[in-house]
């Protein structure tokens, strides 16, 4: 079972998508403002500054005449921190004062309201020119005084344009960074989902097969999920060690007590007592428990497949039914059989027979007289597997404990009034696992039955 079925539905992807979307919205808005509003802001701010400067020179000219304006211009030009450019000429176009080399006549673009965009040539003897170069882009306005003197006031926009270019470039760089972050967040989210699914699949495999020797794949040691996998592997080591110790103790007890019980049985058989047969039956029951324990352990640990051969599974099921036919008839149970013919399977015939027999034995044991049992063997072509199903309308089990039925010694009948030792289905589970199959339980599938159990064994076709 995969923890996350669809990558796009994972929390990692959703968080990275929301985070990326918010970043892109913010950066896009910021870029739009800088790109669209910056040009208009540049024009309006420059126009206001030039108009203010022209207003000051107009007032000065009207009050004190040309000499005052020339003096003011020379003071302005001498200040290298001044961004303004000037050219004052008389009515005959002769230069009077300023830091522009000549009156611009070409490359003049009208912007609005008398505001012009020019290519300004700076005078070579100006410190400002030596610092900035000979030509600059500027915005200018022209004012004419009363005696036909004309003053061009321009403002260099080089520094402003550079600041705006830097802001726009920063926005573009930020967009690129956000795109990289978005890609990385998606990649990280995909990596996290893949690793979580890998951990989930491995855990599901361990749960379904009971093979505690499986371990989570660890491909690195730098990320948190790899560290989590390492911690889980260590936990599995401890669990496997504990389970092995418990199994070893129970197997040792079973093995060590089997010989004394056999001797005890021999002594009882030589006795002449009225309870002799009861004691022998109890010894046989204890020996059966120990033998079942040892057999389950042998199947689970050794994984022997030497006895595997191609067998007719339909004939095996038919033999199991023939074995229990007398018991079924004694309880007047209505038996319904549906077997697909000639189903071949590479298996251990004796073990499969034992597994099917234990399942049918449980159904017969817990089905009332005149009850009903259904036995079916089918072939699912799409999944390429065989299904052995036994339904009964007997006492059934509580759905809350249905997953415990294959545990060793587990019996829902706590009083142990029914015969059995709680190892039958544990042996079935071990045999089915050896054949790489699966066993599950559900409410009975018999129509109209108020209680009962359905046992389904699926075996993959080799």
Image (cartoon, rainbow, N blue to C red):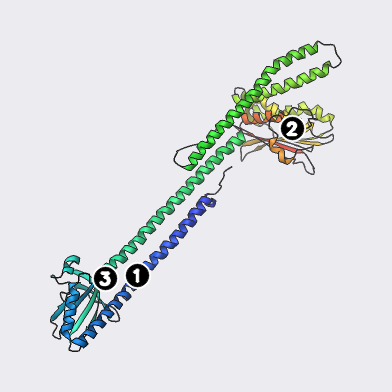
Q: Is residue 16 above or below residue 153?
A: above
Mark with earlier residue (2, 3): 3
Q: CA distance from mark 3 to mark 1?
A: 13 Å
Dividing the picture into quarters, in which one does residue 420 lie?
A: top right
Q: Is residue 193 above or below residue 69?
A: above
Identify the mark at residue 157; answer none if there is no mark: 3
Between disc 2 and disc 3, the foreground one is 3
Dividing the picture into quarters, in which one does residue 458 lie?
A: top right
Identify the mark at residue 38; answer none if there is no mark: 1
Pinpoint residue 175: horizontal percent, then vertical percent.
39, 59
Identify which residue is drawn at 43% across, 62% down: 26
Please tell me which residue lies in front, 121 or 201. 121
Would you say residue 24 is visible in this rendering?
yes
Looking at the rendered structure, the secondary structure element under dot 3 is loop
Give the residue furthest to the right: 274
Q: CA distance from mark 2 to mark 1?
A: 82 Å
Q: How many marks?
A: 3
Pinpoint residue 70: horizontal percent, then vertical percent.
16, 81
Mark with earlier residue (2, 1): 1
Task: Tell me the residue that label 2 is attached to.
Answer: 411
Pinpoint residue 211: horizontal percent, then vertical percent.
59, 31
Mark with earlier residue (3, 1): 1
| Residue 267 placement, left or right of 434 | right
Q: Residues within 10 Å of mark 1 (few under 14, many from 20)?
A: some
Please tell me which residue lies in front, 79 or 423. 79
Pinpoint residue 188: horizontal percent, then vertical percent.
46, 48
């Amino acid at each position: 079972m995969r923890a996350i079925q669809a990558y796009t539905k994972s929390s990692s992807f959703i968080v990275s998508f929301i985070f990326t979307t918010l970043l892109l919205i913010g950066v896009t808005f910021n870029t739009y403002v800088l790109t669209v509003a910056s040009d208009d802001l540049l024009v309006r701010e420059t126009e206001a500054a030039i108009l203010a400067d022209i207003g000051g020179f107009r007032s000065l000219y009207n009050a004190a005449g040309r000499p005052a304006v020339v003096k003011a211009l020379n003071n302005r030009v001498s200040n290298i921190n001044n961004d303004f450019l000037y050219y004052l000429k008389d009515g005959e176009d002769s230069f009077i004062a300023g830091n522009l080399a000549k009156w611009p006549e070409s490359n003049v673009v009208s912007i609005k309201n008398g505001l012009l965009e020019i290519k300004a040539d700076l005078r070579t003897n100006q410190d400002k020119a030596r610092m900035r170069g000979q030509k600059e882009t500027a915005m200018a306005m022209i004012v004419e005084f009363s005696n036909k003197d004309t003053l061009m006031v321009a403002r260099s926009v080089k520094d402003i344009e550079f600041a705006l270019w830097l802001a726009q470039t920063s926005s573009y760089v930020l967009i690129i960074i956000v795109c990289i972050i978005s890609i990385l967040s998606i990649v990280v989210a995909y990596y996290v989902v893949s690793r979580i699914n890998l951990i989930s699949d491995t855990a599901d495999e361990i749960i379904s097969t009971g093979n505690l020797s499986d371990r989570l794949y660890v491909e690195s040691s730098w990320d948190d999920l790899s560290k989590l996998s390492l911690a889980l592997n260590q936990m599995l080591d401890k669990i496997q060690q504990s389970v092995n110790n418990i199994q070893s103790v129970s197997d040792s007890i079973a093995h060590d007590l089997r010989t004394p019980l056999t001797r005890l049985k021999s002594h009882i058989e030589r006795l002449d007592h009225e309870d002799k047969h009861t004691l022998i039956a109890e010894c046989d029951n204890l020996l059966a428990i120990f033998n079942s324990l040892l057999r389950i352990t042998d199947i689970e640990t050794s994984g022997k497949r030497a006895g595997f051969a191609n067998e007719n599974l339909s004939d095996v099921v038919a033999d199991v039914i023939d074995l229990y036919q007398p018991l079924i008839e004694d309880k007047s149970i209505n038996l319904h059989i549906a077997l697909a013919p000639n189903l071949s399977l590479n298996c251990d015939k004796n073990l499969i027979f034992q597994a099917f027999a234990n399942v049918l034995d449980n159904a017969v044991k817990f089905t009332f007289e005149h009850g009903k049992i259904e036995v079916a063997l089918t072939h699912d072509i799409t999944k390429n597997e065989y299904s052995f199903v036994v339904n009964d309308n007997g006492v059934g089990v509580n759905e809350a404990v249905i997953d415990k039925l294959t545990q060793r010694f587990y019996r829902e009948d706590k009083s142990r009034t029914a015969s059995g030792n709680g190892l039958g289905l544990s042996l079935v589970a071990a045999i089915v696992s050896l054949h790489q199959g699966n066993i599950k339980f559900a409410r009975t599938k018999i129509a109209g039955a108020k209680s009962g159990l359905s046992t389904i064994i699926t075996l993959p076709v080799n």
